[in-house]
Amino acid sequence: MINFIKYLFGEKSESKQDTQINKVTLQAKLQIKEPPVICPYCQKELTQIPQRKKKCPFCKNYIFAKHRPNSKIKELVTEEEAKRIEIEWNKIHSHNALIRDLEDYGFTENDFNRRKEEKIKQMGKEPINGDVIWSLFIEKLQNVMKSNKFDLLSGMYYNMSRFLIKEGRNPFETLKQFQKMKLLDYQQQGLKKVEILWSGNGCEACGKLDTKKYSIKKALEEMPLPNKDCSMDVFETGFSWCRCDYLPFIE
């Protein structure tokens, strides 16, 4: 019983002591003076911290509040330094976008770096990222062609088409190969006929192809897809992207 009472009083005593310590800590914090806010141009003290962009009341230059890629603390910097920091961020964003694209196309960062080093040795200069990626496509395409797997080839040509349109280049020929590989894959599966499916919100020229039926042999001869008259500039690059597709047709 005595121990229990001591325990209770001890807890209260400690709680009171903790409160006193917290009060002292709070008072000490209140007494700490924040470092002065200094203009990066004229070095004069400012009355408040700029949140983004603000003109110095003394020298009239614009002050920028920026944090660098390796820091979460904002700094007050000059316009010139702000531009340099922005370049650092752009490099990081571009690199991250590149990695996402590589993964989307079925490549790794190591694949890219290996091929880039090879091109630097060949050319004696830094290659364009798009050229490096395209050479990876060609290398992979050559390897897949040996397997005679038309479904894989179809996927390869589709990704190549996506890459080209993103680069602002005409994807018609690679889309044509994509559709050809799809027909060959159907043929390999023993199918005889296909039916064209219109996307429903495409152009008038593609609408005319909707539900048209072809033997796979005839479709391979005429290659109605991608529609050469398609006017759907889906990605706003000045090049059409026909969204019509083949479906197996069984009578």
Image (cartoon, rainbow, N blue to C red):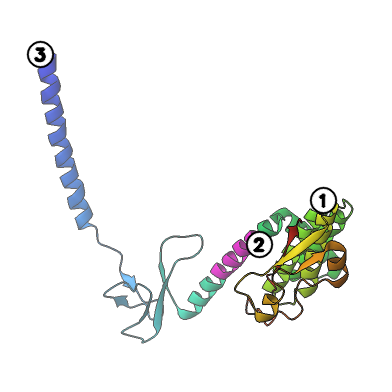
Question: Would residue 31 be visible to someone looking at this image?
Answer: yes
Q: Earlier in the sequence, mark 2 or mark 3?
A: 3
Q: Which of the two discs, 3 and 1, sits closer to the camera?
A: 1
Along the viewing direction, whichever of 97 and 154 lies nearer the viewer:
154
Q: Which residue sits at x=18%, y=41%?
A: 21
Whether residue 76 sits left or right of residue 11 in the image: it is right
Distance from disc 1 to disc 2, alpha carbons, whole Å, reads 32 Å
Decide: is 229 above or below 225. below
**How many residues crowd around disc 2 within 10 Å: few (fewer than 14), some, or many (20 or more)?**
some
Query: Pointer 1: residues within 10 angstroms few (<14), some, or many (20+)?
Result: few
- Is any atom of residue 126 visible in this view? no
The x, y position of residue 171, in whole percent, is 75, 73
Q: Which mark is residue 189?
A: 1
Q: Which mark is residue 169?
A: none
Residue that numbered label 2 is attached to: 101
Residue 129, quarter of the rendered image: bottom right
Q: Which residue is mark 3?
A: 2
Residue type at numbered disc 3: Ile
Which amino acid type is shown beneath numbered disc 1?
Gln
Q: Earlier in the sequence, mark 1 or mark 2?
A: 2
